[in-house]
Amino acid sequence: MPSYDAFLLVSFGGPEGPADVMPFLQNVTRGRRIPRERLAAVAEHYYAFGGVSPINRQCRDLLAAIGKDFAAAGLNLPVYWGNRNWHPLLGDTVAAMAADGVRHALAFVTSAYGSYSSCRQYLDDIERARGEEGAAAPRIDKIRHYFNHPGFIEPLADSTRAAVGRLPRAARVGAHLVFTAHSIPEAMAAASGPPGGRPPPGRYVTQLTEAARLVAERAGEHPWRLVYQSRSGPPAQPWLGPDVCDHLAELAAAGAPAAVLVPVGFVSDHMEVRHDLDVQAAETAARLGLPLERAATPGTDHRFVSMITDLVRERLDRAPRAALGRLGPGCDACPPDCCRPPPGPAPPPAARPAPPASPVDVT
């Protein structure tokens, strides 16, 4: 079995103050020709929360919980954290790991699914960070997809039942479960998975559908559907649908008694959850007169944290590979051509943004 001497938490990153917002958005969308007025509109979502994304705070909390769980389990691994798009940047973290003498690290990515944007792009950014550091860079292996692990499914199922319980009593029976995930271009979704092994609709939609089914069957007798949110592409480009707000309108028109949003595509309350669901979708439901609640994401639930420890143990000492449902546990290593987007202009690597206005605590 491989020997590992460090653990690396890899996430998306987000601004931590108003001055960070536009540089962060420009970095995320570099090379995509997003009009500045569109970026300015998205920036307002962050400004409404003080210019602070919740994701970095959640990563700090998760990293602290992982450290405690490792210690309780007897895992003597130092923990590091690096982001793709904002400080602490992955390249800086890999440099720090190299300076500390780390030679072989195991990386956990805060995305449970397989696609270019949710898996392959993280792998590419890890390799880019290693390339920047050169020969001293540690080898970094990514932990497998965990969309069907009990430590991910069970907290979501519990929070879904709790959300149903917060609905008006008369609306609970027959309430619809609306599972949401980040929309991506249809072509990217179809290309998710290894070539020759990704029948329609592709790995991303297949894994999301299975995760939603696993949560739904544990949450009681409720009709459910997987929908999408947070589309950001040009109108002429087909993206996964239906949109969550359009689906809420359909439910209201059909006389549904209530709906519960279940952000199955997210491990914590990103801005897409806090704004796109808690603000936009909630406003839509209120306008339609549709009672609405939202299930909590796994976040730092003890079962989710223990799942991470278990996934590390899988790689360290052949611990049992837990998985629920029909698809089984994923492979440890994706093929080099897995989840590659269709031929076309490759997005440029993210630029290194300027240091934040205030120090970022990475401990």
Image (tube, grey):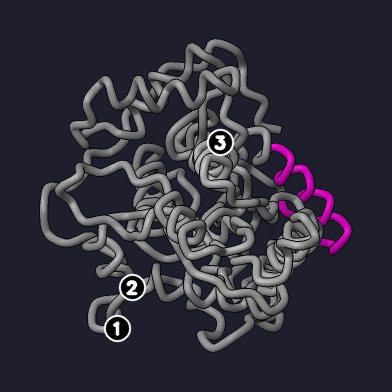
User: In the image, what residue occupies the spot 48% across and 12% down?
Assistant: 19
Q: Earlier in the sequence, mark 3 or mark 1?
A: 1
The number of numbered badges drawn on the structure is 3
Residue 150, percent from left and from top: 70, 74
- Marks 1/2: CA–CA distance: 7 Å
Boundaries of the magenta span: 60-77
Using residue 74 as the reference point, say whether residue 135 is left or right of it: left
Q: Residue furthest right?
A: 72
User: In the image, what residue occupies the spot 34% across and 46% down?
Assistant: 231
User: In the image, what residue occupies the spot 74% across and 40% down?
Assistant: 61
Q: Using the rendered image of the protein, determine whether residue 309 is visible from the camera's viewpoint.
A: no
**Res. 193 mark:** 2
Helix, strand or loop at mark 3: helix
Residue 181, percent from left and from top: 47, 57
Q: Residues within 10 Å of mark 1 (few under 14, many from 20)?
A: few
Q: Using the rendered image of the protein, determine whether residue 305 is visible from the camera's viewpoint.
A: yes
Asked if the residue at tag 2 contacts the one at tag 1, i.e. Cβ–Cβ closer than 8 Å, the answer is yes
- Marks 2/3: CA–CA distance: 33 Å
Q: Which residue is mark 1?
A: 197
- State the quadrant of the N terminus: bottom right
- Marks 3/1: CA–CA distance: 39 Å
Q: Amino acid at mark 3?
A: Val
Residue 198, percent from left and from top: 30, 79
Q: Amino acid at mark 1?
A: Gly
Q: Nearer the viewer, residue 197 or 353?
A: 197
- Dominant secondary-structure state across the stretch colored magenta: helix
Residue 148, percent from left and from top: 59, 74
- For discs 3 and 1, the disc positioned in front in the rendered view: 3
The quadrant where residue 317 appears: bottom right
Q: Nearer the viewer, residue 206 or 228?
A: 228
